[in-house]
Every structure is written in C-alpha cells, then in structure tokens.
Amino acid sequence: MAPDGRRAETDDAAAAPESVAVLRDGAGRLLARWLCTPDRLEDLATGWLVAEGHAAGLREVGPLRTVDERTVEAAISPAVADRILAARRTAGPAPDLADVRPAGPGAPPRSRPGPALRRLLAEEGALARLFAEGLERGTRRAEGGGIHTGIRVETEVGEEDHGAAIVDVVEDVSRAAVTDKLVGAALRGGGRLDLSVFLLTGRISAPIAAKLVRSGVAAAATLSVPTVLAVEIAAGAGVVLVGRARRGTPLRYGWPS
C-alpha cells in the first residue's frame, strides 16, 4: 500500500523481498529480530550469533531449527541467551566498536591473509572477474533489483586464480544479513573464513567490519568504499579491505607488510 492508504500502482513481483524474521531460544524468548530477505534463516542466525560476538563458534551456537518461514530456534546455552539480552539492554544509539574482539575462547582467531589470498588480492582484475561471475549466479538482483549481493571466495581450493573459487552467493535486502549469512554458511559447512574474501556490493561500514573481525574473515572487497571507522577496525585486526573492487586498480586498505 502507498503511504496514504491507496494501493501502490506497481507490480508486487518487482518489489525487493523483505520481511521480519526472528530468533528465539528453546524457552521461546525473543533473542533477535531482523529485517531481511526471509531465506537461509539458519545461516543468518549462526552468522549473527558469531559475528555479533554473542557466541564463540558453532559450539556455542548449538543446534538450530527452522520453525516456520520467518522463525528460527536456537538451542543455545542460558549463558549465551543472557549475553544477548544484556547487550540489548545496554546498547546505545551506536554499538561500541572501539575495541572489537572475537567473542572469547574458541572464537575464530585474528589472522592476516595467507600467501594465496594475498596474491589474489594483488592481481589486477582478479576481484573484478570474481565479482562478475558471482553476480551472474544471483537471481533476485537480475529480476528486480533493490538487493545486496555477497560472494564468498575461498583460496587454496583449486588450481586457477591462485586456487580461488566462489563457494557461496547470498542475496538480501540487508547488508548486515548478507554478511551474517555468508559467515553462518561457512561455519555450518566447514568453510575456512581465514582463507576467504567476501565480495560485497554494499558499502563496508563499521558494524560490517566488526562482523568480519569477530568472525575471522581474512579480507573483504566492496564495489563502493569502506568508511573511515571500518578501515580502522579492520586494520586493527589485520583484515584487508578493498574498495572500488571492479576498477582496474582498486583501492586497498590495511595491506599487510
């Protein structure tokens, strides 16, 4: 409906898919609410729990169950649930990103890109080629737009492009949900985030950079540019960021020595 109550004169099929999805614990307590494209909710929940620093890896996430198309349930410990609820009570207008750290013992380690990933990031045109391939695999972006795309590229998995291969493509109306789903799918599927670069169509903001650091992602590239705070957060953890990644000569931030 239009804001004044009249029916919008548009084709509903052309609108980007968005709804409210929720995460509950085994006791039915509401832990999170997302505005997102309602698919891959177990990947979203896993990624959100780890990337926001509430859970230190799969061990603390525990089993997940999709209840319906907009609800996922996590069998997390009471300690993790209490951690989430406490963070919600103390959160201000913006999260405290001054000292972003992984969640604790068992969390993904901070690591700098290995040799194969460094070669991939340095090669002229390599990220642009992978971006083009990943975007072609998406469907929602081509159908109607209004969507963000995330592509996870993992190195040391083949012979071409320095052993780099696209292992996942995510589309969502939310930039944060794109990142969470990529993280969650990698963790649930046994992927190596420390050997991965995320290719993101959206801007890398400070909260997105914080998710990358907490999850142990080695590098991320964007079609846009990262924010100043995002660069600061990523550099403090040795995470390389790349801006204008489809240009012949992209912008690199926090390049390791």
Image (cartoon, rainbow, N blue to C red):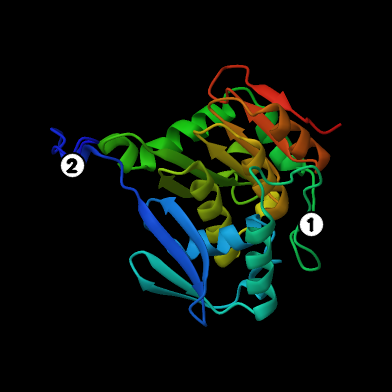
Is 117 drawn above or below residue 128 in the view shown?
A: below
Q: Nearer the viewer, residue 14 or 245?
A: 14
- Residue that numbered label 2 is attached to: 12
Is 215 drawn above or below residue 132 in the view shown?
A: below
Q: Quadrant of the N terminus?
A: top left
- Residue ID at (71%, 45%): 218
The reply to whether callout 2 and callout 1 are in contact (CB within 8 Å) is no
Q: Quadrant of the C terminus?
A: top right
Is 85 drawn above or below residue 94 in the view shown?
A: below
Q: Is residue 251 left or right of residue 1?
A: right
**Residue 50 percent location from the top left of the image:** 64, 61
Q: Nearer the viewer, residue 62 or 206?
A: 206
Front of the two marks 2 and 1: 2
- Residue ID at (15%, 34%): 10
Identify the disc placed on residue 27.
none
Is 90 drawn above or below residue 209 in the view shown?
A: below
Query: Of all residues shown, which one is farthest toward the front?
Result: 4
* Residue type, numbered disc 2: Asp
Q: Tell me the SS state at disc 1.
A: loop
Query: Is residue 40 visible to the viewer in this orientation of the structure?
Result: no
Query: Of all residues shown, which one is farthest toward the top?
Result: 248
**Residue 206 percent location from the top left of the image:** 67, 38
**Residue 31 percent location from the top left of the image:** 54, 67
- Residue that numbered label 1 is attached to: 109
Earlier residue among tags 2 and 1 = 2
Residue count near mark 2 (Cα–Cα under 10 Å), binned few <14, some 14–19, many ≥20 = few
